[in-house]
Image (cartoon, rainbow, N blue to C red):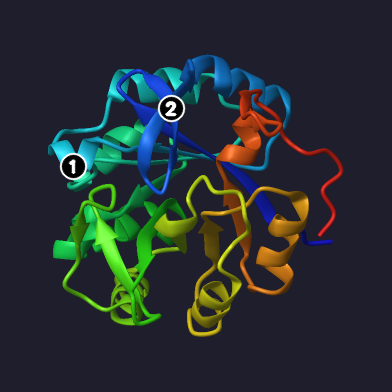
Amino acid sequence: MYRARVIPCLLVRGNGLVKTRKFKEPVYIGDPINAMRIFSDKEVDELVVLDIDASREGREPNYALIEEMAGEAFMPVAYGGGIRTIEQVRRLIRSGIEKVVINSAAIESTDVIRHAAGMFGSQAVVGAVDVKKTIFGGYRVVTKSATVEAKIGLDEHIQRLVSAGVGEVFLNNVDRDGMMGGYDLSLIHSITQRVSVPVVVCGGAGTLEHLAQGVSEGGASAVAAGSMFVFHGKHRAVLINYPKNIDF
């Protein structure tokens, strides 16, 4: 029987792991290699690793760290951050990454998505979209760790990604990042009803119920979270964890 994937999302800054709130105030939570080993032991469905500074700083992915992390992984790993060229995609795939997550580069042009999907298949290409709510109740697309507002509408941008050949859309809600109060289900539902590829949602999950709602009420094909997999208790003590016997 099909079960929606439950995906920890890890944020890399330099050579360490951090966790943010609303894409701000990064808190150091540990060594990414150790985290990868723990998540491998816990047999997670999949893992997303995002370098939160690479695109904003205009630099390439940290290939040495990525290769070391991929070497410890016994699950599919998706990586995003600083990807702008097909050569970079090729190098990441050769390093052991199953999927590349492309965000900032796709705002300017979808060429790298088209080339990557043509070369490695759509299943290897994820289009990431970061959104923030406007004062009028709509949503705007932001990029480069939410420091720049994109001059394109949300629906138009997602359709561009799908037309270019992404196999999945990774929808991340900046306003709910790290808050653990639940997903924006109305936003998720509005997107999943109009998109022809699987949608992975992130931003806001703090409980198993939240994850289940992302699937049952939002219509997501997979649910991702950061804080609930690296923190424990009201004081947010660092404890890498992953639920057992997921059934939704």
Quarter of the figure that contains the C terminus:
bottom right
Q: x%, y% of residue 232?
A: 69, 30
Q: CA distance from mark 2 to mark 1?
A: 18 Å
Answer with the quarter of the image where residue 87 lies: top left
Q: Which residue is mark 2?
A: 27
Which residue is at the front of the view, 248 or 140? Answer: 140
Q: Is residue 229 above or below residue 183?
A: above
Badge 2 density bin: few <14, some 14–19, many ≥20, Cα 10 Å? few
Query: Looking at the picture, which amino acid does disc 2 mark?
Result: Val
| Residue 15 in view in this figure | yes
Image spot of residue 167 (x, y percent): 45, 63
Q: Reading the chain from its start, which is encountered first: label 2 or label 1?
A: 2
| Identity of the residue drawn at 28% across and 33% down | 91
User: Is residue 109 visible from the viewing direction of this image?
Assistant: no
x 40%, y 19%: residue: 16
Horizontal and vertical percent for residue 52?
A: 32, 38
Question: 162 left or right of 91?
Answer: right
Residue 56, numbered circle:
1
| Count of numbered marks | 2
Dot 2 and dot 1 residues touching (CB under 8 Å): no
Rendered position, 10 above or below 130: above
Q: Residue at x 27, y 25 (%)?
A: 62
Q: Which is nearer the eye, 236 or 7?
A: 236
Under tag 2, what secondary structure? strand
Give the SS element for disc 1: helix
> Is residue 152 left or right of 29 when viewed as pictured?
left
Question: Which residue occupies the foreground of this view, 112 or 147?
Answer: 147
Image quadrant in which you'd find residue 186: bottom right
Amino acid type indicated by mark 1: Arg
Q: Quadrant of the N terminus?
A: bottom right
